[in-house]
Image (cartoon, rainbow, N blue to C red):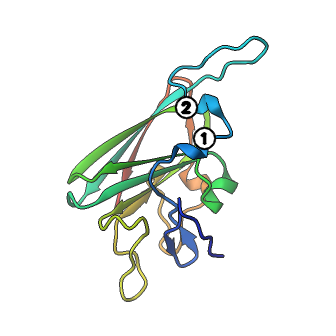
Amino acid sequence: MERNSTMTGFKYQNFTLGLAAFTLTMFAADPTALASEPFEQTGVEAKSFAPLTVNITSIDNDEGDILIAVFNSEDNYSSDKTIAEKTVAAKAGTVSAQFHSLSPGSYAIKVLHDEDRDKKIDLSFIGAPSEDYGFSQNARDPFSQPEWEEAKFELTPTGYTATIQVK
């Protein structure tokens, strides 16, 4: 099933790599998600945040951008409903991004090296991806995106560092 969206939307046959530029509007339902530090309100439990560092390795060149999408549930992962997104300039070798407004819990990450900055995965003449991509836990499936269980990790209160190889 194809899903049209301005934020996500590069498709590869039956799976999506739903990545795009970071938008602040996705946090509109939770104003504390943008706070750099949890704030306190009388009668309201303050949220605790844990740092997530994402290192993307094996980047072939400096062309385009690296799109990073973070998901907090199997349903969101399958339907490309991100909890956080970032775009960083591509640099041959390794680039890193940090997320500071995530609560401890289960997450998965999708990454695309969007060399032509069109916010979609490009396909070869035979329909195979021609831009590099990767998933948390370096999960891979030759014919579709890996399952949530293969890509998920636990963000603990002390944080987590994910290293994702794009290929």
Residue lying at the far top of the rendered structure:
42
* Residue at 32% from the left image edge and 56% from the top image edge: 65
* Residue at 42% from the left image edge and 64% from the top image edge: 119
Front position in the image: 60 or 82: 82
In the rendered image, the vertical position of residue 110 relative to residue 126, given as above or below:
above
The x and y percentages for residue 145 are 53, 66
Binning the other alpha carbons within 10 Å of mark 2 as few (below 14), some (14 to 19) or many (20 upward) gives: some
SS at badge 2: helix
Q: Amino acid at mark 1?
A: Phe
In the rendered image, the vertical position of residue 71 relative to residue 19, given as above or below:
above
Q: Quadrant of residue 126?
A: bottom left
Residue 113 placement, left or right of 15: left
Q: Which mark is residue 51?
A: none
The x and y percentages for residue 11 are 51, 73
Residue 21 placement, left or right of 117: right
Front position in the image: 118 or 123: 118
SS at badge 1: helix
Dot 1 or dot 2: first in sequence order is 1
Quarter holding the C terminus is: bottom left
The x and y percentages for residue 38 are 59, 20
From mark 1 to mark 2, how far is it between C-alphas? 7 Å
Residue highlighted by disc 1: 27
* Residue at 56% from the left image edge and 26% from the top image edge: 49
Residue highlighted by disc 2: 34
The answer to whether any part of residue 103 appears in the image is no
Assess whether mark 2 and mark 1 are in contact (beta carbons under 8 angstroms): yes
Binning the other alpha carbons within 10 Å of mark 1 as few (below 14), some (14 to 19) or many (20 upward) gives: few
The x and y percentages for residue 166 are 35, 58
